[in-house]
Image (tube, rainbow, N blue to C red):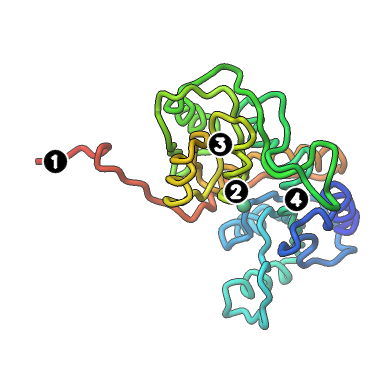
Amino acid sequence: MTVRAVVDALDARYPRNWAESWDRVGLVLGEFEHPVTRVLCVVDCVPETVDQALDLGADLIVAHHPLLLKPVSSIAPDTFKGALVHRLIRAGVALYTAHTNADVANPGVSDALAARLGLTGLRPLAPAEGAAAGEGRGLGRVGELSEPLTLARLAEFAAGRLPVTAAGVRAAGDPERLIRVLAVCGGAGDSFLADAARSGADAYLCADLRHHPVSEHLASGGPALVDVAHWATERPWLDEVAAWLREVFAVEVLVSDVDTDPWTVHANRNDLEISP
Ligand SMILES: [Zn+2]
C-alpha cells in the first residue's frame, strides 16, 4: 500500500471540491510512492500528535484540521508550523487533511457525533449546495433522541457519551425544557444557529458558542443550546474514518486520544470545597 493509494481512496470518499472555498484539504506533505503500513487519525496536527505518530511508527497522519490553512511565506524550522513540517518530512510521515469536505460528507463528521448520542432519523442541518449537493450530504445533522430528556439531563448525557475534556459541557436555556429532537454540528456551530431554529430541533449541540449570539438566539425563541469542547465534537469521527480505512486497506489504523482541545482547566466556585 502506498501513500498514493490511500490518498486516492480518501479523495474519493471526501472529494476536495466538497470543501468550502476557504478551506485547504488533501495531501499536505508526503511522498506518493512511500509505503503505508500504519495510519494515525487525529483531529489536530500539533506537536503532541506528531510526537504520538513518530512514537507509534505511523507512515501517514489523517487529520481533520488543516495544518496550513492560511498562506505562509516560510516553513523555517523555528516557526511553529515549519517545525512540524520538518519533523514529519524527516521522519517520512505523510500528512493528509479532510476538513469541511468530511463535514459535509454522508457519513461525515456530524454523523459520528450524532451516533455517539444515539440520534436516529438523521437529516442534514444545512443541506449541501453546489458540488457536494445531494444524498443526505450537508453540514450538521438533526435527529431524535432515543428518549426525551430535560436540557439539564441532556447536558449530563452528552458529557457521559462524548470524550472527556477540561471544558466539559454547558447548556443555555431552561434546564427543564424537554428535548426530543436534537441538532448537532461537529466543530464551531455559530453560523448554523438560524438553521437550528428553522430545523424544528428542541436543542442544538455544537462547539465554540459565544455570549451575544447565544443570548440573542435564545431571546428570539430558538432551540436550547449545548456547548461542547471543539475536539470532543470531532473526535468521534476519527473512529468512523479509521474503521473505514481498516475495511478498505490491509493497514493498521490507530486513533489518537490525545486531547488537543486548547482548554485545559475548568473551575467553578460552586464546585470548590471552600476551606476556612
Ligand atoms: Zn473543527
Amino acid type, label 3: Tyr
Whichever of callouts 3 and 4 sits on the residue coming sooner in the sequence is 4
* Residue at image location 51% in from the left, 46% down from the top: 229
Q: Which residue is under mark 2?
A: 187
On whether ligand 1 comes within 8 Å of the CB at mark 2, the answer is yes
Residue shown at 17%/40% (left/top)? 274
Q: Secondary structure at mark 2?
A: strand
Q: Is residue 271 above or below residue 209?
A: above
Frontmost of labels 3 and 1 is: 3
Frontmost residue, 252 versus 146: 146
**Mark found first going from the N terminus, 1 or 2:** 2
Gap between marks 1 and 2 measured at Cα: 38 Å
Q: Residues within 10 Å of mark 3 (few under 14, many from 20)?
A: many
Looking at the image, residue 209 lies above or below residue 71: above
The structure residue drawn at horizontal position 62% and vertical position 44%, both measured from the top left corner, is 186
- In this view, which residue lies farthest toward the left? 276
Q: Which residue is mark 4?
A: 39
Give the answer, above or below, for where 110 lies relative to 82.
above
Residue tagged 1: 275
Query: How crowded is the residue under tag 1: few (<14 C-alpha within 10 Å), some, or many (20+)?
Result: few
Please, what secondary structure does the residue beneath circle 4 have? strand
- Which picture quadrant has residue 79? bottom right
Looking at the image, tell me whether mark 4 or mark 1 is earlier in sequence order: 4
> Which residue is under mark 3?
204
Q: Quadrant of residue 140?
A: top right
Q: Secondary structure at mark 1?
A: loop
Q: Nearer the viewer, mark 4 or mark 1?
A: 1
Q: How many marks?
A: 4
Q: Position of residue 51 (x, y in %)?
A: 60, 59
